[in-house]
Image: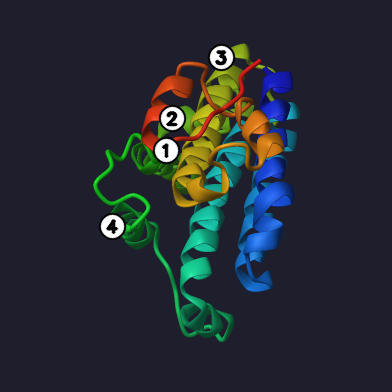
Amino acid sequence: MFKGAFRRLVAMQAWRSELLDDRLTPGSLQFALEGQNDLLVAYLLARSGQWRTALQSQRAAIENYLNCLFFMDHPIELQLWEKNSFKTQFSELHAYFVKHPSNAGREQRTCGLDVLKSEYAVLSKAVHGSAKVFRMSSEDGPNFFSNDPASLGKWDHRNRLVIRGLSLLMLSVFREDLVATRKRNLRKSLSLALRKGDKGWIKNEFNVTIPFT
C-alpha cells in the first residue's frame, strides 16, 4: 500500500514539474507546493502510524490545491490575501469550480469535484475530532502510533480518492495542455493516480490519452 501511495506522490510531482512550474505565478504556485508538501507529510505520518494527523494533512492538501487554481485566475484577490484582506472557504471554492468554464456543463464526477467534496467532509471530521473512528485514544489510553492494518487500509482509501480527485480537477482545467502528444511524461505519470477504467471516458470527455502500462 505504501508503494502505491508513493507512486501517487510521483503523479503529483509530475503535475508540478511538468506543468505548474511553467504556468503559474510564484504566488499561486506556492499553494501547489504546500499542497504537495501536505500530501508528502500525510504519507510520512501514515508510515509512522499517525492516522488522524495523516488524514488532517490530506484535508489541507485539498484546500491548498483549490486555492492554487483559484488564485491562478484571481491575481487581485491573491494580492489581497497576501495582505490578510481576503479569505477563502472550501464551500466557496467548490462552488467556483462547479461553474468554472473548464467544468461548466460537466458532471462533477468527471472533474473530481464530487469526490473532493465528499472527502473534504470526511476529513473534516478527523480535523475537528467529531467522529469516534478518528480518535487517537481508547479505554486503554492514548495510541499515537498504530500499525493497525485496518487503519492503514482506511487511510490508503482516502489517499487514493483525494489524489484522484485533485488529478481529475487539474486534468479538466489544463486539458488543452495535455491533448494529442503534449506532456506525455505528465500523462504517463497520471496513470499512477487514476484508475485503468478511467482511460476510456477521459479520452471521450477531454480528448486526453492516459498511457497506462
Q: Give the foreground label among 3 and 1.
A: 1
Residue 32 in the image: state x and y as whole percent: 63, 56
- Which residue is tagged 4? 99
- Give the residue pinned by disc 2: 202
- Cα separation, mark 3 vs mark 2, equals 32 Å
* Type of amino acid under label 2: Ile
Q: Earlier in the sequence, mark 4 or mark 1?
A: 4
- Where the C terminus falls, by quadrant? top right
Mark identifier at residue 85: none
Q: For this rendering, which residue is in front, 131 or 179? A: 179
Residue on which the image places disc 3: 150
Which one is in front in this view, the residue at disc 3 or the one at disc 4?
A: 4
The foreground one among 212 and 151 is 212
Residue 120 location (% of width, % of height): 42, 44
Q: Which residue is mark 1?
A: 206
Instruction: Return the residue found at the far left.
Output: 105
Dot 4 amino acid type: Lys
